[in-house]
Amino acid sequence: MVTTMPEAPSHQPDAPASSSPAPEKDPESIAIENLDFAYGDHRVLHGIDLDIAPRSVTALIGPSGCGKTTLLRCINRMNDLIDGARITRGAIRLGGMDINTPEVDVVDLRRRVGMVFQKSNPFPKSIYDNIAYGLRVAGVTKRGAINEAVEKSLRAAALWDETKDRLEKSALSLSGGQQQRLCIARALAVQPHVILMDEPCSALDPIATARIEELIQQLKRDYTIVIVTHNMQQAGRCSDQTAFFYLGRLIEYATTAKIFSNPSQRQTEDYITGRFG
Amino acid sequence: MSVLTETAGLQAPRAKSAHRKGRALENVIRLFFGGNAFVAVVVLVLITLFLIREGFGFFGGNLQNLRSYRAAGLEYVDIMRTQAEAHAALSRALSEVRVREARKLAEQGRSLEEMNSALAGFDQFATSFSDAGNNLAGLVSDLGDQAIALKERAATGEPADVAALRSNYPAYEQISAATTVEINALLANPPQLSTPEAQRAFDKVKARMRTSLAEFPAEAQRLREWDPGRPVRWYESITSFLLGKEWITASFWQDWYGVIPLLAGSVMVSVVALTLAVPFGVASAVYISEIATRPEQNLIKPYIEFIAAIPSVVLGFFGIAVLGQAIRALSELPILSWVPFFPLSERLNVFTAGALLALMAVPTIFTLSEDALRNVPRAFKEASYALGANRLQTIARVIVPSSLSGIVSAILLGLGRVIGETMVVLLCAGNRIAIPDFTEGLGAFFQPVHTMTGIIAQEMGEVVQGSIHYRALFMVGLVLFFLTLLINLAAQKISARYRMSIG
Amino acid sequence: MEKGGGASPSSILHSPSSRRRGWLLEKTIFWSFRLATYLVLACATYIFLDIGIKGSSVLFTKSPPFVNLEFLSQAPETLYVFDYEGKKMTLGDREFREWKTSHEINDAEVTSVAYSAGGIWPCIVGTALLVIGSMALALFIGVSSAIYLSEYSRNGPAVRLVRTAILNLAGVPSIVFGLFGFGLFVIFFGWNVSLLAGWFTLGLMVLPAIITASEESLRAVPQGLREGSLALGATRWQTIRKNVLPYAMPGILTSSILGIARVAGETAPIMFTAAYATRDTMPWQVSRFSDFFFQGVMALPYHIYVVSSKIPQNDYTARVQYGAAFVFLLLVMLIALGSILLRTRLRARLQW
């Protein structure tokens, strides 16, 4: 692979983080501090404190409507798109930097914090153009660099072998599981630090789900992954830490092993064992 | 390895200025689009303001117009004129009776001489009656000239003195008394007509003569009480527009700007159009969405939408060239002679215009109703079928009721389209500025009318800019504007409720 | 007959006569609905056929090139009808003057019929100019407003006001737009009867329809595409340009073609803002470039209005009346047909 830019990507495990100009903290670390969030007058998050460890998988679980997707969408400010939605207190820091201050460019933030949606949403373009999209909008025009990034991302998303012969085919011709992996590859192509996944497997069959989970395990070596899931087994299988939310509050946050074997809160236990939710 | 320049950190200094530029560009783009969206509001406000600006000047001018009407004594003369015109109308009625009698006699095979001799008595009566009105007509004509002269003098700033005009009152009283005597004498000894039909008509005219005579003292009273100094209140300018029954422009005597004849024309044309378009539009919407086979749907739906694209001027031309003629020819068919108002004298009338407008309203009503019907949730239909209802029952009791507000709003929008349509009514409604004669019953729908849209189109090109007439046309436009606005808002309200009831 | 209840519901429900009556009623009503539908179609078809058949005899000829080029390429002229040496002569204005140079004719014996000779070329040109200008204006403002409303705006009171304004603007009668255009552009701005005044009047008239339809097509693009793009670090404008507009374009195109049909078909708004009953010169025959915008033009719909209301209906006028109506109908119908076909095809292709 050819290095086109002098900076070494900071999130490569083999490249030390010191290459970024002034990192106060690990740029992949996410710190959520005492966060309140409301849709209009309706408060949906109450005083969330959560430190997300870099290069690991953090699962957000909880019953529907508990605010976990809202929290996820706060991290790359996708909630900006929703009328009346706003953070009323607290902050989210990415690498020590408050992402909601005016100095932070939301476009730049989103390049750093990729997102995979519940329903796969490939653009109705070719597979190649889907992956290249993020690079092109970021102003990359060199064909060689794009080609390389496309191949790399598709390999990273374990999709290369299936698609290398039909990169010019429409992305909509892929199967559901493949489309979701394409969306992951698309997110990888812009080399984010963090990948947010909002129930990425909810619309997939078990086999496709297994492949995505496998992929998540590979990706966590290089990326910080935050995943929202309704599937307890999935949270148990592929996350390192788990945060349990209930009615807009963070009830418990611990390593996945602890949460699933020995939760300290009664509500967590009830939810995990299926007594409610 | 990175192909991106700014992966290093959120505050990478090199990227910062680029971001700022990017953000500035975003803001410019956003402002640009927002500004354009604002244009729509600006236009609506401009239209409203402009119509109001040009239209409201009308009231001042019209008030002036009404005041000079009274001050110069035109009003005084018009009181007498009503009486003279009533007399003339009775004279015309008499000659109509004569025509009727003559036609019957001709059917009986009488020759011209025989007819004339048979009708000699009646002719004598009619001539005497007509002559009895001559003096009054002469007086009205003389006074009219005086009043006009007064009005012209008043326009130059001189005070109008109507005393000279009123000094003719004794002459009027004299004429009136003489006329009463003459007519009473005539009525005491009326001729007999041979056919019962004509006799009945004649009796009616005689009754009208008596009521007309009984009016004389009241007329005299009004003349005595008439006061040129009685103020014309400001609101009379508005009421004379909104409730005025006459639209007379460019008249040497007095201009009247009453919107009622135009409104009546617009409403009557719309009534005809909707009476035809609603059943057809809704029936075809129900047919296409619920009954028709798929190939039928695929063909008929676009075809009906296609009808909406027919330019209105082409429809109007068709009305002039074909439909009007056809309707008249139809009305002349002997088998239809039992219809009281057939045969038609005018080929361009309310019905001709209404029928064509119906064709324009059908696509609107069809398309929107069909949408509403189609949006009825499948579950409603399935539930109905599952309970053993047949298709007709499901349509009548489930589908149509639950899309009713959508259909109603479709009809309202169709009405909006019909009432605002110009070319068809301009070409096919006959353009006679008069409130139709409703005593003819349904026949009123076969009389020529003028409409609000038509009058603007016809007269706008010829008016003096800034004149009362010009402003009156803007007022008509304003009425039209608010009328359609009201219809639209109602349609929106209704369809909003419908969405709620479905969701 | 479909109500159960009563003492013995089963007997009522299963009585064969009630079912038979229901079936008959259903059939009758369905057939009357079908009849109503087909009657509407028949009426429209009759109009198409009447104008089509009588118009084709003007527009098409039996010999090559099979199209009456003269009718399409000449300006309207007055027709002169007279008897000469026992022959009935019908001559257009120019021919008549030429003919008069070599023949003697008493003017009193000549009947003249306005507009009935020559063709409709200047009207076609004028209509085309009006359509191009007003559509350019309406599309520019309309599509950008729609982009703002659907992509940028938050649902605040200001935006609601804009939406209400647009919805209501769509219902304003075209003659009111004409009145407004006349008052504002022709008189207040002093543009006189001109192309420019016509462009603005027609453009504003069709604007609400374009905005509404464009916004609808933009909204039909799934939200996922926008979110996906934004999440990849695209700016709003990049997202709109690359990932929303291309997919909304077919819808916008369809609506704008329908807008063309509407703009071309309207007469009332141009009657006193842009249209002349007759003009001797073609629009490009102007001395100064700026005069181009401030000249009135002949327009096909207005010409049809003039020839159908200002001159009598007879054998001599039928040619221009039916010819113009047919050409105009054909043009507008082709545009509308194009839009309908386009929509059907695109609907089939773009299914989310």
Image: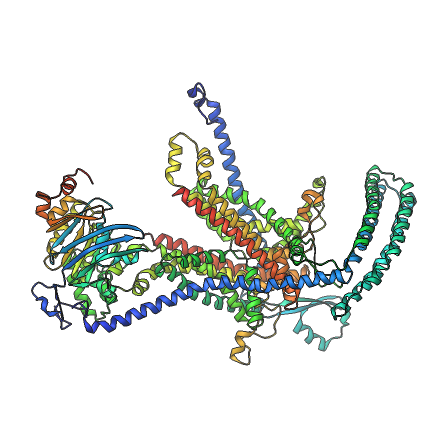
Q: Quadrant of the N terminus of chain B?
A: bottom left
User: Residue B344 or C176: which is nearer the viewer?
Assistant: C176
Say if residue A239 shows up in the picture.
no
Above or below for C94 versus C135 = below
Above or below for B212 versus B163 = above
- Please state the total of marks drawn on the protein image: 0
Say if residue A23 shows up in the picture.
yes
- Residue B196 position in % (x across, y down): 83, 37
> Does residue B257 appear to the left or right of B216 in the view shown?
left
> Does residue A150 appear to the left or right of A18 in the view shown?
right
> Does residue A176 appear to the left or right of B322 in the view shown?
left
- Residue B402 position in % (x across, y down): 44, 40
Q: Single out the residue that lies furthest toward the left.
A: A14
Q: Single out the residue that lies furthest toward the top.
A: C7
Colour scheme shown:
rainbow
Residue at point 34%, 54% (across, down):
C350
User: Residue C188 or B368: which is nearer the viewer?
Assistant: C188
Above or below for C202 versus B135 = below
In the picture, residue B9 is in which quadrant? bottom left
User: Residue B184 or A118: which is nearer the viewer?
Assistant: B184
- Residue B286 position in % (x across, y down): 47, 41
Q: Quadrant of the C terminus of chain B?
A: top left
- Residue C172 position in % (x across, y down): 53, 57
In the picture, residue C306 is in which quadrant? bottom right
User: Residue A40 or C115: which is nearer the viewer?
Assistant: A40
